Amino acid sequence: MSCGAAGPTRAALAGVLAAALGTAGCAPAAPRPELVVAAAASLRDALIGLQPGIEGAADARVLFNFGASNDLARQILAAPHADLFLSADDLQVDRLEAEGLIEPGSRAVILSNRLAVVALAESSLRLSRPGDLASSGIERLAIADPGGVPAGRYAREWLVRAGVWDQVKDRIVPGVDVRAALAAVESGGAQAGVVYRTDAAISRRVKVLFEVGEGEGPPIRYVAAVIAGRPGAARARSALEFLRSAEARAVFERFGFLPAGR
């Protein structure tokens, strides 16, 4: 009787031990580290296309935070939760660098772009030079907020250089970022807009009336930098190295971006 009682107990113990040994080699893998990339809104489509390459280079899961570069810089100044910053101008990186938030030696100009004047695809507007933006047919002109957003500041500087800013400034419809300016034209909220050529290229609802020629507007520079003091700094450096590679450059150029030297 006692032997009979002991048998099932030993079997049960053996089963538990076997189960434990069997699952020991199947323990859940440690969660993959995350890399937070704060990037200018105009880079959204290209970066999403490059996400697998970035994740492979950094050996991390990438989390994007897209927005106006000045807003992203403000967020990082308030709470530096990003690992890598991709700004549409130098000024925002300058702000962070002045506060010691940029890892020394990591700053790099990676891309350029060009401004374009757009209208709805079905629009009858025929514009070919900046002075045409002051015509009576344009009651509202969409640009990103010229008070802080890089695309808006570039647009204003171009219009100032062309001598038409004072004629159009009261018609400006400012957007929170360049994609918002594009949306204003797409929705009919503005008869024309000044956006990056890369933004115009992704929209089926607008057409490019003309591009701002090289030398006519300010140089457009996309600047990347690793945020200092973050645990993911090494992964951010690897991601940035990939973004400067020939493989990434080919993708950026497919979306209409220009090499950094332009």
Image (tube, helix red, strand yellow):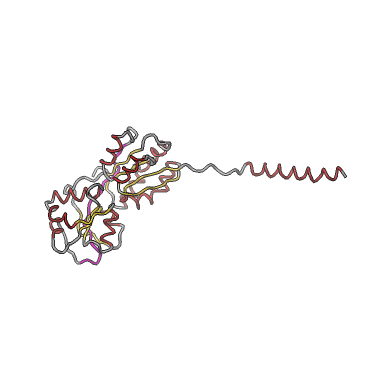
- 116, 187: nearer the viewer: 187
Provide residue 198's location: percent of width, then percent of height: 28, 53
Task: Residue 228: give x, y in percent of width and height.
Answer: 36, 35
Quarter the C terminus occupies: top left
* Number of numbered discs: 0
Residue at 32% x, 41% y: name it. Answer: 224
Q: Nearer the viewer, residue 88 or 207?
A: 88
Q: Hey, which quadrant is residue 246 in on the image? A: top left
Q: Residue at x 36, y 37 (%)?
A: 227
Q: Is residue 148 above or below residue 201?
A: above
Position in image of residue 33 (x %, y %):
47, 41
Most foreground residue, 38 or 52: 38
The span shown in magenta is 107-123
178 shown above or below 57: below
Asked if the magenta segment contains residue 171, the reply would be: no
Q: Residue furthest right?
A: 1
User: Is 220 in front, or is 253?
Assistant: 220
Name the chief secondary structure element in magenta.
strand
Check residue 108 for magenta coloring: yes
Residue in view at x 70 percent, y 43 percent: 18
Residue 201 drawn above or below residue 24: below
Quadrant in the picture for residue 132: bottom left
